[in-house]
Amino acid sequence: MLTKYKIVFLGDQGVGKTSLITRFMYDTFDSHYAATIGIDFLSKTMYLDDKTIRLQLWDTAGQERFRSLIPSYIRDSNVAIVVYDITNRDSFNDVQKWLDYIREERGKDVLIILVGNKSDLKDKVVTSDEAEELSKKLGCNLFIETSSKNGYNVKKLFKKVAKMLPELKNEPTEQETNGNNVQTIDISTDKPEENASSCQC
Ligand SMILES: Nc1nc2c(ncn2[C@@H]2O[C@H](COP(=O)(O)OP(=O)(O)O)[C@@H](O)[C@H]2O)c(=O)[nH]1
Ligand SMILES: [Mg+2]
């Protein structure tokens, strides 16, 4: 038996959502191909204390630019990871907007994590203090800075998320597992219609 959790990644295009997922799943970083990955979700099974949990990591293939596609993407999510780029003030200013979308769709039934990515870069313009402050103001469950490029804090982020899952108001029901893979990759076949017709231009 294992419990499955849907984790969605939100944030402006280019902040490093796909790269974070790729770093966590495969421990790799590729500055050229990340943006073109068009997956629905990848699954990773984690063993935590005496519990087996499966994290379903939902990525977008550029749909974050289309407001109308966001609600279906967020639907049924247990965790929303909102990412901004620490060298890009606009991406930080948009955090509030992403939070509004999440609250609109999920209310309080979701854990919200604020991630400041690209911590390896020297030209940081968003300070940790102001991000911490915004995180508290918006009621996020956690704020953390990461680098998908050098891996800084990426494992820590997902470990922390996994530990926080029992805090969820409506925990998902336990579901059968179809094996004991430590890591599995699921390519969803039941794409929401809207996503299927989105372009990657
Ligand atoms: N220096 C640095 N570049 C990153 C990092 N994460 C992502 N990038 C780069 O930022 C660009 C956008 O990343 P991507 O994962 O496609 O962003 P997404 O649009 O949010 O999915 C790519 O060129 C990545 O190589 C990071 O932690 N550090
Ligand atoms: Mg992406």
Image (cartoon, grey):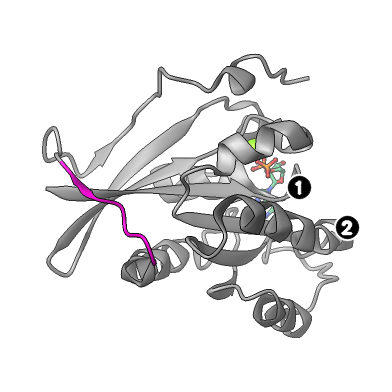
Res 42 quadrant in image: top left
Q: Would residue 49 appear left or right of 156 to someone viewing this image?
A: left
Judge: label 1 CB < 8 Å from ligand 1: yes
Crowdedness near tag 1: few (<14), some (14–19) or many (≥20) residues, C-alpha within 10 Å: many
State the residue at coordinates (84%, 67%). 123
Residue 177 appears at what percent x and percent y?
Answer: 15, 38
Q: Disc count in the image? A: 2
Q: Would residue 45 appear left or right of 187 to someone viewing this image?
A: left
Read off the residue under disc 1: 12
Q: Amino acid at mark 1?
A: Asp
Secondary structure under tag 2 reads helix
Q: Is residue 68 visible?
A: yes
Q: Is residue 31 visible?
A: no
Q: Would residue 86 appear left or right of 22 to someone viewing this image?
A: right
Q: Amino acid at mark 2?
A: Asp
Read off the residue under disc 2: 90
Residue 37 appears at what percent x and percent y?
Answer: 58, 27
**Vertical comparison of 156 with 198: above or below:** below
Secondary structure of the magenta portion, mostly?
Answer: loop
Quarter of the rendering occupied by the C terminus: top right
Chain part drawn in magenta: 169-175
State the residue at coordinates (76%, 65%). 86
Asked if marks 2 and 1 touch (Cβ < 8 Å), the reply is yes
State the residue at coordinates (16%, 62%). 51
Secondary structure under tag 1 reads loop
Instruction: Give the Cα distance between marks 2 and 1.
Output: 9 Å
